[in-house]
Amino acid sequence: MKDFHVVGIGNAMVDILAEASDGFLADNGVGKGIMQLIDMDRAIELYAAIGPAREISGGSAANTIAGIAQLGGRTAYIGKVKDDQLGAIFAHDLRAQGAVYETHLAPKAHADETGRCIVLVTPDGERSMNTYLGVTEHLTPADIDEDQIAGAEWIYLEGYRFDGPESHEAFAKAIAAAKQSGGRVALTLSDPFCVERHRDAFRKMIAEDIDLLFANRAEICSMYQTEDYEAALAKGAADMEILACTDGENGAHILTGEARWHAPAEAVEIVDATGAGDLFAGAFLWAITHGFTLETAGRMGCVAASEVISHIGARPEADLRAMFRERGLL
Amino acid sequence: MKDFHVVGIGNAMVDILAEASDGFLADNGVGKGIMQLIDMDRAIELYAAIGPAREISGGSAANTIAGIAQLGGRTAYIGKVKDDQLGAIFAHDLRAQGAVYETHLAPKAHADETGRCIVLVTPDGERSMNTYLGVTEHLTPADIDEDQIAGAEWIYLEGYRFDGPESHEAFAKAIAAAKQSGGRVALTLSDPFCVERHRDAFRKMIAEDIDLLFANRAEICSMYQTEDYEAALAKGAADMEILACTDGENGAHILTGEARWHAPAEAVEIVDATGAGDLFAGAFLWAITHGFTLETAGRMGCVAASEVISHIGARPEADLRAMFRERGLL
């Protein structure tokens, strides 16, 4: 038995969640429904403009790891925070959920701070993300513990983590360590604009190393530079062993070889869409590392996504196992 | 017209909210339903033991001021934070709600940090508070701006703020400035154990200066050292011009001279009781500074309290004015 079902690598950050109108987004140059990278000056300016907020630990892969941990999976997370109050909050929340988190802290003297994401939630529940990466941008190969990676059945790579000076080298080191120990590699494309920035790197990684790809409709279409969702799915299925693609209220499609399943979305009022894809991936990974079929994994993914969009914040609040049991999946 | 309807003075802190079982409270020495003062070591120990949390600005009087500001009242707040990330969060959230907040920041070199309250919410919605005061304990007379106080119709004093080395002197300065400018003085007793610690000081202040007292059943009984709620109400009504006393699901009693009104509690599922008394006081103060009767003020207080206990966090989320309109109060 390996030490970990999943080890995730991503951008460690605390979400700053506030409600905002569509007019506010337009007036303040915030792109709706996407993730925009911002610097500290912009973060300060935007933060001063938004309404009262609350802080909840986030980070895409960290949300996924938190979901797996809540389900009882053995997990670890690699991502950089600073020795500051937001860093302490991030570390606490992940450990309190049961994940192993031993990243090297950036020292107090570091010029940057712990990363944060100003998430503006519009009345339709859509989230528009404004990310100050801070120290999480500076994850380097030295932060990748090969022994920890070797102890993982799966490693889970966050597409957003491709931004930053030594990100690609850090991922390469992690992938090599995983492959050498018989581990498998999952990647999430994170965001269509993230795909724009890193399409070539993603394609190379997919061609060589990726066993399982998570994407949503916009991302997979951006990856294959087509507006034809079915064509993009077909190309994806040909490029890797497993493709798990979410499509909002249309649920998710799981493809492997010639086989294909559709998992319906749960009917739920969207309060805050933040974390839907992250929790889909979390439940999916938990399922496939616990002997469930890909079809069931897809259905569990949709249930977990429905939980996290029914409240503010991207970490699960309700008991996901209980939700699976209620639906006869467990 | 004065600059402010209400200027509040209290302990500035960020709430760290987590769910906990009654067993967890017992195992970790947390007194249920009350506020306990803790030092930094205990804060670190307790924080490490609790589950995933979220951070939302709190502080009793600050919650009250946020409520008045959300209703459109002109407000200012006096309370000390440090120049750190939690201090920035507290300041942002109050200003974003529309309150004036210009307290002197404790510098980065200060040994203490911005205050925080670890709020453990049990399944019954009751909150058990563990407060690390940090720099907010060190509010001194120098932090009281007499011109600001002179610009207030009412000043609102938080009972919790009686803890700390120069608190009484700071309150005395504020009261003197208010009285000289024709302002009036409201006090909240905050907590029955707070009353235990400061009964004599509260009594002296009530006898000499307080025009309006906010309390709940346990606090007013503790103040007058009786288990007879009606007897405590009668004594309170004799001691000050207006007594506004909340009694949980039994609503609130408003007493002035020989007159007395009862405001019924709203039927609502309690998710998190944090801030119920604070928002009662906020709506009450907004009402009496906007020409409403004491009876209506009591009813508005109960409506506002019901809003804040229906969700996690002690600041209002729904539109309180809309809630008043729906009930024909506005």
Image: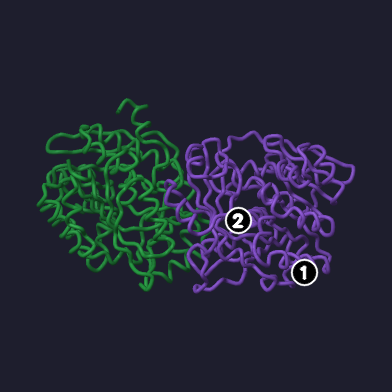
Chain colours: A green, B purple
The residue carrying mark 2 is B59
Residue B322 lies, with reference to residue A24, above or below; the image says above
User: Pointer 1 and pointer 2: residues touching (CB < 8 Å)?
Assistant: no
Compare residues A2 and A193 and report the one nearer the observer. Answer: A2
Q: Are marks 1 and 2 on the same chain?
A: yes
Q: Which residue is mark 1?
A: B150
What is the chain letter for disc 1? Answer: B
Above or below residue A323? Residue A157 is: below
Residue B179 spot, x, y in % from top left? 82, 65
- Residue at the image position 87 percent from the left and 42 percent from the top: B259
- If the image is split into quadrants, where does the C terminus of chain A sit? top left
Q: Is residue B282 visible?
A: no
Extreme residue in the top direction: A328
Give the residue drawn at x 77%, y 51%: B213
Q: Chain of mark 2?
A: B
Circle 1 — which element?
helix
Q: What residue appears at the point 28 percent right and 38 percent down from the top-left corner? A: A252
Quarter of the image that includes the N terminus of chain A: top left
Q: Amino acid at mark 1?
A: Ala
Residue A53 visible in image: yes
Task: Classify residue B58 as left or right of residue A114.
Answer: right
Q: Is residue A73 above or below residue A61?
A: above
In the displayed structure image, the side of residue B142 where residue A221 appears, left or right: left
Tally of marks: 2
- How far apart are the two marked residues, 1 and 2, measured between alpha carbons? 23 Å
